[in-house]
Image (tube, rainbow, N blue to C red):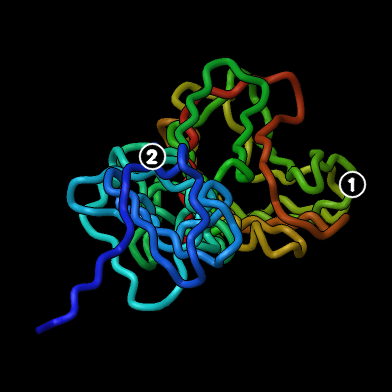
């Protein structure tokens, strides 16, 4: 005849009321909670720790909340977890998450700078991503903020569309480095120009300028506007900051100007945080500036 082994059992309330001392190695089960304790021969029931706590397990019919808990061991599997309602907070990058709480602008993608993730406009490998559009109408200066964009962009390009001014003047630009716009006379630039009805090239150049002259006179005749591309090749490398200048200017109904050249701020090294388009007098800009980034 087989032996029958039974475990002492009762409800949790009755166990607590009796406060029994279980013998060494004796088991006691709570019939209404499925919890088990094992005796040591001296500790009363209410002071004895549970050997198995069924409430700490997730079952098909149970719902459990874990706070500051660690799941140890190997081959642990969690299934059927609702990520839309059952998980809150931000998962840090170090733990496999993104570290961000908002999805960002529709159509954006995640871009990593090696440490953090950021939401940014998508850019295919080797292609330009459109980042900002600024329209000026009677503005003495136009500022393009590079620091507002992800550091994943290594090169920026500003496209000028139908840019002109209300006075005849020389269009210029200044760089923001180290938190302030540089106005000392350490800009170097050389910009060549060719008039549509002339064979020879002329140039504007300086090694002691407080800014970079990026074009010839604009605003001194009807329909005088500029279309140009200004490429900033090394904005985040902490080196001397440069610009490559390429554009065309509808000078009048008779001819146009082509502009080719470059400029550099030689006064200090650092990341290029912004560029400011200004004038040599009190003229005001009109037109459109579009910023693109290249990863």
Question: What residue occupies the far bottom of the structure in this picture?
Answer: 1
Question: What residue occupies the far front of the structure in this picture?
Answer: 1
Q: Residue at x 23, y 54 (%)?
A: 59
Count the labels in the image: 2
Name the one closer to the observer, 79 or 291.
79
In the rendered image, the quadrant that contains the N terminus is bottom left
Q: Residue at x 50, y 45 (%)?
A: 19
Instruction: Give the side of residue 160 with respect to residue 30, left or right.
Output: right
Whether residue 214 is visible here, answered yes or no, is yes
Name the one closer to the observer, 35 or 75.
35
CA–CA distance in space, label 2 to label 1: 91 Å
Res 65 → quadrant = top left
Location of residue 5 in the rendering, given as x and y in whole percent from the top left corner: 24, 72
Decide: few, some or many residues near mark 1? Use Cα within 10 Å; few <14, some 14-19, many ≥20. some
Local secondary structure at mark 2: helix
Local secondary structure at mark 1: loop
Disc number placed over residue 185 in the picture, else none: 1
Q: Residue at x 18, y 79 (%)?
A: 3
Decide: few, some or many residues near mark 2? Use Cα within 10 Å; few <14, some 14-19, many ≥20. few
Name the one closer to the observer, 121 or 190.
121
Res 56 → quadrant = bottom left
User: What residue sits right under mark 2 in the picture?
Assistant: 14
Location of residue 277 in the rendering, given as x and y in whole percent from the top left corner: 65, 35
Instruction: Give the side of residue 37 with respect to residue 173, left or right.
Output: left
Q: Residue at x 66, y 59 (%)?
A: 236
Disc number placed over residue 158 in the picture, else none: none
Of the residues under marks 2 and 1, which one precedes in the sequence? 2
Location of residue 280 in the rendering, given as x and y in whole percent from the top left corner: 76, 30
């Amino acid at each position: 005849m087989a032996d029958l082994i039974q475990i002492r059992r009762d409800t949790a309330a009755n166990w607590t009321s009796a406060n029994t001392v279980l013998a060494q190695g004796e088991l006691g089960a709570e019939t209404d909670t499925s919890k088990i304790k094992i005796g040591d021969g001296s500790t009363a029931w209410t002071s004895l720790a549970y050997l198995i706590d069924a409430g700490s397990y997730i079952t098909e019919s149970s719902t459990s909340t874990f706070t500051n808990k660690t799941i140890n061991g190997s081959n642990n599997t969690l299934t059927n977890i609702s990520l839309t309602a059952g998980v809150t907070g931000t998962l840090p990058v170090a733990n496999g998450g993104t570290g961000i709480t908002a999805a960002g602008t529709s159509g954006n993608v995640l871009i990593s700078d090696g440490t953090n993730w950021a939401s940014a406009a998508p850019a295919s490998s080797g292609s330009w991503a459109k980042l900002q559009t600024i329209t000026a109408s009677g503005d003495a200066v136009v500022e393009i903020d590079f620091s507002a964009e992800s550091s994943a962009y290594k090169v920026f390009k500003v496209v000028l569309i139908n840019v002109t001014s209300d006075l005849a003047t020389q269009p210029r630009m200044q760089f923001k480095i180290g938190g302030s716009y540089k106005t000392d006379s350490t800009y170097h630039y050389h910009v060549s120009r060719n008039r549509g009805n002339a064979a020879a090239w002329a140039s504007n150049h300086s090694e002691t300028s407080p800014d970079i002259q990026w074009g010839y006179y604009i605003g001194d005749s009807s329909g005088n506007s500029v279309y140009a591309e200004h490429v900033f090749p090394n904005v985040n490398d902490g080196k001397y900051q440069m610009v490559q200048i390429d554009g065309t200017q509808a000078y009048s109904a008779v001819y146009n100007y082509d502009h080719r050249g470059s400029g550099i701020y030689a006064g200090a090294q650092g990341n290029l945080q912004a560029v400011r388009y200004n004038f040599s007098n009190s003229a005001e800009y009109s037109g459109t500036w579009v910023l693109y980034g290249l990863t």
